């Protein structure tokens, strides 16, 4: 793995370990000044307040088509919020597996699960590019504002394809950009952990999904997210800001679905 990717991974892991232990918000306005969430979970069935750290950028379960008895995989499961919402859809006859690369998040999710008394939800430590899941095991993959943080997105989608059953689907909420982000954003850890600098152009993102063998790929929702100028001005000079404005450079929250061929 390139050293730059290792550094990104370490920075993200360290920051999310801090979020897990302190309860600080990584993608929300309190931490970065950028409101990624957009949609509140408070009326969503299965929502668990203690597991909601404000890290999402969409509601992937809404378009995931989860059925009773399904086995669901939540990528970047954090403290367990989306996994618990998915569990509401699968019922007691199904199961949910959450994978996260941050040990502190896994510990927090397991504690939340124990409090809830769920015996069909589990959390595993692992990286999205090398999932600790058997091939052709999963009925539905969900993820919420996580893949933008993964340096090798192609490897992550290849793993999603591997673990899904033939004919099974994914539903992912994530952050993408309108065009290629300038180099200065890639060097800013605060923006990267805030889910901005890891974003790639939407066309490239959808291209990776198609290239890894998925079909019926659809963007179910898209929402523009404006990064406050006072946040950008901490990392960019006037010329850089003017260039970004002239190109209408922005990021978007999207929810995308796709399926593995039979």
Image (tube, grey):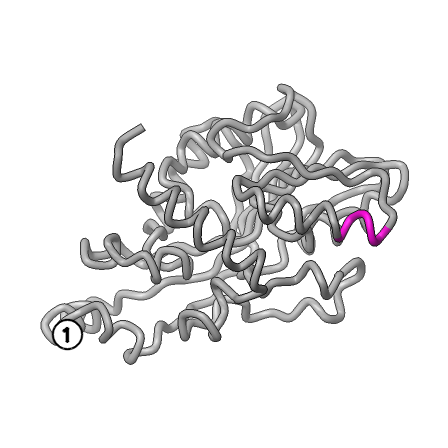
Q: Quadrant of the C terminus?
A: top right
Magenta-tinted stretch: 112-116
Q: Is residue 55 left or right of residue 248?
A: right
Is residue 194 or residue 180 the one in the foreground? 194
Task: Classify residue 254 as left or right of residue 141.
Answer: left
- Residue visible at 35% across and 47% down in the picture: 203
As displayed, is residue 214 above or below residue 60?
above
- Residue 152, compared with residue 244, is above or below; it is above
Q: Residue at x 69, y 55 (%)?
A: 81
For the point 60% across and 50% down, the residue is 78
Q: Which of the image's four quarters has the N terminus?
A: top left
Q: How many neighbours does mark 1 have within 10 angstroms: few (below 14), some (14-19), or many (20 or more)?
A: few
Q: Is residue 114 magenta?
A: yes
Relative image position of residue 51 (x, y in whole percent): 69, 58
Identify the main secondary structure in magenta. Answer: helix
Q: Residue under circle 1?
A: 242
Describe residue 196's horizontal placement relative to residue 245 as left or right: right
């Amino acid at each position: 793995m390139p050293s730059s990717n290792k550094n990104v991974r370490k920075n993200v892991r360290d920051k999310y370990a801090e979020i897990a232990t302190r309860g600080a918000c990584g993608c929300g306005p309190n931490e970065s000044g950028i409101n990624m969430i957009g949609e509140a979970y408070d009326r969503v069935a299965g929502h668990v307040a203690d597991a909601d750290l404000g890290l999402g950028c969409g509601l992937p379960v809404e378009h995931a088509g989860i059925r009773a008895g399904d086995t669901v995989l939540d990528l970047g499961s954090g403290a367990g919020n989306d996994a618990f919402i998915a569990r509401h859809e699968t019922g007691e006859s199904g199961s949910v597996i959450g994978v996260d690369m941050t040990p502190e998040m896994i510990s927090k999710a397991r504690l939340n699960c124990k409090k809830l008394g769920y015996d069909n939800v589990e959390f595993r430590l692992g990286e999205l590019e090398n999932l600790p899941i058997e091939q052709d095991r999963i009925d539905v993959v969900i993820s919420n504002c996580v893949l933008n943080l993964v340096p090798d997105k192609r490897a992550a989608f290849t793993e999603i394809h591997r673990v899904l059953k033939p004919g099974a689907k994914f539903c992912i909420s994530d952050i993408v950009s309108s065009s290629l982000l300038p180099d200065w954003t890639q060097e800013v850890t605060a923006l990267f952990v805030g889910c901005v600098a890891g974003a790639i152009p939407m066309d490239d993102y959808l291209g990776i999904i198609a290239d890894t063998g998925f079909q019926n790929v659809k963007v179910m929702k898209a929402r523009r997210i404006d990064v406050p100028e006072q946040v950008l001005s901490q990392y960019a000079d006037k010329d850089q800001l003017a260039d970004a404005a002239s190109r209408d450079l922005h990021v978007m929250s999207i929810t995308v679905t796709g399926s593995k061929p039979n």
